[in-house]
Image: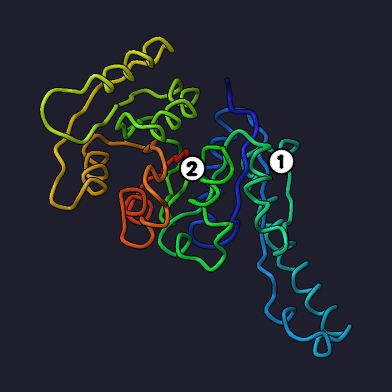
Amino acid sequence: MAIRSILTSYIGDGGGDSALRLAVQMAQKYDARLTAAVWQPANPLRIRPASFLTREIDAILDQAETEFAETRRAAFDERVAQAGLQGRTDFVSLSGSHAAGLAAYARGHDIVVMGGGPAALRGDSFAVRPDVVALRSGRPVFIVPPGYSAERIRETAVIAWDGKRAAARALSDAMHILGTKEHVTLLSIGSGPAPDHLQGAQRLMALHGIEAEIALRPAGPGGIGRTILDACSELGAGQLYMGAYEHSKFSEDLIGGVTRDILENAPIPVMMSH
């Protein structure tokens, strides 16, 4: 199955601009339709007592929110025009009351591309955090670090594989992307001979016409997350593919974990599925 519809969000500064860069590159590569969604949190003034929120103030807030969306739409239109994507894009504005619906909106697309980094993962708007969208949407989400500035997609991929359910879901979701890569590595963290489930994943990929090398690394002193990122650097990975939150997201938020470590520190785009 080819990618035909890409959704990107967080248009603007930081990781959002980086996400738009990758989304445009993917739309060009896969001849896909690109939709940009800009989300605005509810203005705190609207939560105040009704007696405080006069019609004049309400109109001012409406105007500010409209200008916010229009500014980002103008920037989006300029970017897609430069990329030659006219006629293959859409733009939607989601208000604070629709925050929980971003994941639902994502289900109408093949893949989601969102800005990442510590700021995005610790934002106040829980429902529109990229890792939460990956958990709730049922769609693979590319989470792009703020510093992503590659002029083109690097066609080298690393798949973090542990043989568990989330990793299997990520591999399935990524199969049509991995088939376009020049070099693919199945990475497992552990010692000793390659486990049977790693060889099974390699065999499955071969049946789909994807030649993947196996890499086995012992966990380093920085933990599994750091070991994965170090391996990606060593292997020259352009993207990392992995399952999200095999353990409880609550426990990872509370005490840390592999998913959280990678999302906060990855210097390359990370595709996550759950």
Q: Nearer the viewer, residue 37 or 41?
A: 41
Name which quarter of the figure residue 41 lies in.
bottom right
Image position of 209 (left or right of 88)? left
Quadrant in the rendering for residue 254? bottom left
Mark 2 residue type: Phe
Q: Neighbour class for label 1 at 10 Å: few (<14), some, many (≥20)?
A: many
Using the image, determine if residue 168 lies above or below residue 97: above
* Residue 30 or residue 149, whichever sits in front: 30
Indicate the position of residue 71 as horizontal and vertical percent values: 70, 63
Q: Nearer the viewer, mark 2 or mark 1?
A: 2
* Total count of labels: 2
To which residue does mark 1 refer?
89
The residue positioned 54% from the left and 62% from the top of the image is 13
Q: From the top left corner, tell me how far across and down residue 133 is, in percent.
A: 55, 49
Which residue was labeled with disc 2? 142
Give coordinates of residue 270: x percent, y percent. 41, 43
30 versus 220 height, above or below: above
Q: Identify whether 220 is placed above or below 154.
A: below
- The residue furthest bottom is 52
Image location of residue 120, percent across then percent down: 48, 61
